[in-house]
Image (cartoon, coloured by chain):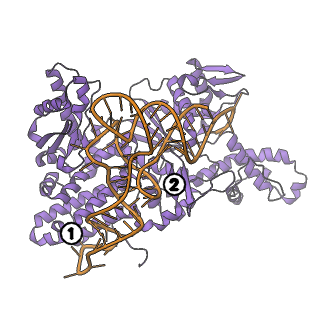
Amino acid sequence: MTLRFFLRQIVAAVAESVAKETGLVLPDGFAPRIDYTPDLKFGHYATPAAMELAKAFRQNPRAIAEKLIAAIDGRAFSKIELAGAGFINFTLNQTAIGKVAAFADLNAWLVSNESEIHSDKVIFEYVSANPTGPMNIVSARAASVGDSLTRIMKAAGHKVTREYYVNDYGNQVEKLGLSFAYRYLQKFKAVTLPEDCYQGEYVIEYLDAMLDAGQVDNALLLSADKIASLNEAEWLAQASRVFAPLGVSAILGEQQKDLKSFRTEFDRFFSEASLHASGAVLAAGDALEKKGKVAVSDGAKVFLSKEYGDDKDRVIVRSDGRPTYLLADIAYHADKVARGFNSIIDIWGPDHHGYIARLSGALKALGFGETPGQQFKVIISQQVNLLENGEPVVMSKRLGKFQTMRDLIQKIPVDVCRYFFVTRGLNTHLDFDLTLALDQSKKNPVYYVQYANARIHSIFRECGEPPGHINIEHLAVSAAGQAEREALLFWLLRFPELVQDIARNYEIQRLPEYLYQTATLFTSFYHAKNNRIKDLLAANAGEAALLLSLCNLTTQVIETGLALIGITAVREMHREDAD
RNA sequence: GCGCCCGUAGCUCAGCUGGAUAGAGUGUCAGACUACGAAUCUGAAGGUCAAUGGUUCGACUCCAUUCGGGCGCACCA
């Protein structure tokens, strides 16, 4: 059990008993907050519960706090104090700590703590870049954050499915096919690529690969002889239909390679075209119509999204009968609902924020959210400004000038990229300066964290492996009165609480911050004279073993934490150059 | 015009559903290697949290207005 959960149960129980005794009623759904104290000298945890209750009880917070304190069974504590305007500060005693946080191994503890949260069946969609070109740096950001968040949610105890939506249907795909057709034609004839085609050179590369692999149908193949009598318009129409799916699968394949090298995984790549093929798209329109949320305007069917806060109603079936992208997306999300997910989370790009109202409106119209616990959450990933030498790099797929995710991975180690992307909240604009990332690579925080871990393993190599079994009570006893040990130990014990928090609020940046602080606390522990394990080995073997055990817990936290953000935890580090 | 994000130390940014003295890194300055790895550590300086008003026991956090910076507003996907 986490210490925080233990305290929350206690405070909730005494709040209830105090309320009952005095004939008062707790606020609806009252769950006391358990916070960390600003400093361990105030205790391990604090609760502002008395302040939160002040209004409902119409009493002075300090008076409430006194009643709460009086009602608490003090056996687990060495100190409970009333502080400030009505904070209650808790200092747990070592026996209680050992009993509550009883674990021999960090991962076992994480698993045993899963019961503290309400486990959700979650579908998490992220990246979902269009299969019309290589992925850019915004996709890399979404990949880092989405992948890390899903790992964290799983660690907290949720059932998570990771999905990537492939927009392999519609105008853009047709244009992609046309771009391939033109590029092929250009090999035999001087024709200009139309402006609305994809201008990037990558089309030529993929085209050549297709031709080499013999994927292009013989009937379409051109030659110098054929060119003279060619009906160009007809050929282009035919060729673009053939090239479109080939192009999509080639580009998707490359995207998947990039994602893999970025250590980003998905359980499924969901094809938009499959929704059209199965009739699911139009069926979604019918479902909305049955709910009375569809009107006809100028021959088109519109979804009445204004009822859900959108600024205008949105077309879902065009006047020519073709469904819009929105309807396909509604169908896709209806499919997620049908698969039984009750938590649907998407990461979208910054240009899609206006889209939230209409899609969440459609889900509501279809009845999603009526069952308690169902939620649809969109996390908007803000822009990434790519800088090189302080100058912005222009990104435009159409013009073919852009920094791809692959360029990024080739320039900067994946560990550094991933760490960099998760150090900022998704809702902030991000300046990624390539030169800076390279220049500072040696002073990069990710190396600092890895270094701390390598140091621990160096201690193990030097002083012997730690005992396999971690005994928290013994660690707490040995930490008593030793500032560095105490700071490190209680910081480490917060790790599962942090995992729970991030799984709830998606604030991924808190994990790298935590790990950095872990490394800092460890090095300060390491430098304290009384913690020199090497010296203790002969003098006090028992204490040496305890400190090795504390190091063991530290490395478990660092390695598990790094794994949650997809970063390698090295156990030995080597300088790249001599200076 | 409407909507979204941002404004915190010289620079890049944290600040956990409102909570105790606003924190890191980097840069600057002053120190520390006969030390399980100096890819390190210790210390100093650096702030009117863009501005104004409001809400309350309490505001960087919530609300309103203003000023700055960025982005988006299709029968494209």
The x, y position of residue A120, in whole percent, is: 37, 35
**Which amino acid, by three-letter code, is at mark 1?**
Gly
**Which amino acid, by three-letter code, is at mark 2?**
Asp
The residues bearing labels 2 and 1 have C-alpha atoms spaced at a distance of 44 Å
Pointer 1 residue: A464
Q: From the image, state the color of chain B.
A: orange
In the image, is residue A176 above or below residue A378?
A: below
Quadrant (top left/top right/bottom left/bottom right) for the C terminus of chain A: bottom left
In the image, is residue A416 above or below residue A237?
A: below
Q: Is residue A426 visible?
A: no
Q: Is residue A308 visible?
A: yes
Instruction: Please tell me which residue is depicted at 80% across the width and 59% down the height of the picture.
Output: A187
The x, y position of residue A405, in whole percent, is: 56, 56
Which secondary structure lies at badge 2? strand
Return the disc, 2 or 1, that comes first in the chain's sequence. Answer: 2
* Between A425 and A240, the one nearer to me in the picture: A425
Q: From the image, state the color of chain A.
A: purple
Residue farthest along the right direction in this orientation: A229
Q: Which mark is residue A431?
A: 2
* Between A383 and A212, the one nearer to me in the picture: A383
Which secondary structure lies at badge 1? loop
The x, y position of residue B29, in whole percent, is: 35, 71
Instruction: Please tell me which residue is depicted at 18% across the width and 41% down the height of the picture.
Output: A89
The x, y position of residue A334, in whole percent, is: 52, 30
| Tag 2 subunit | A
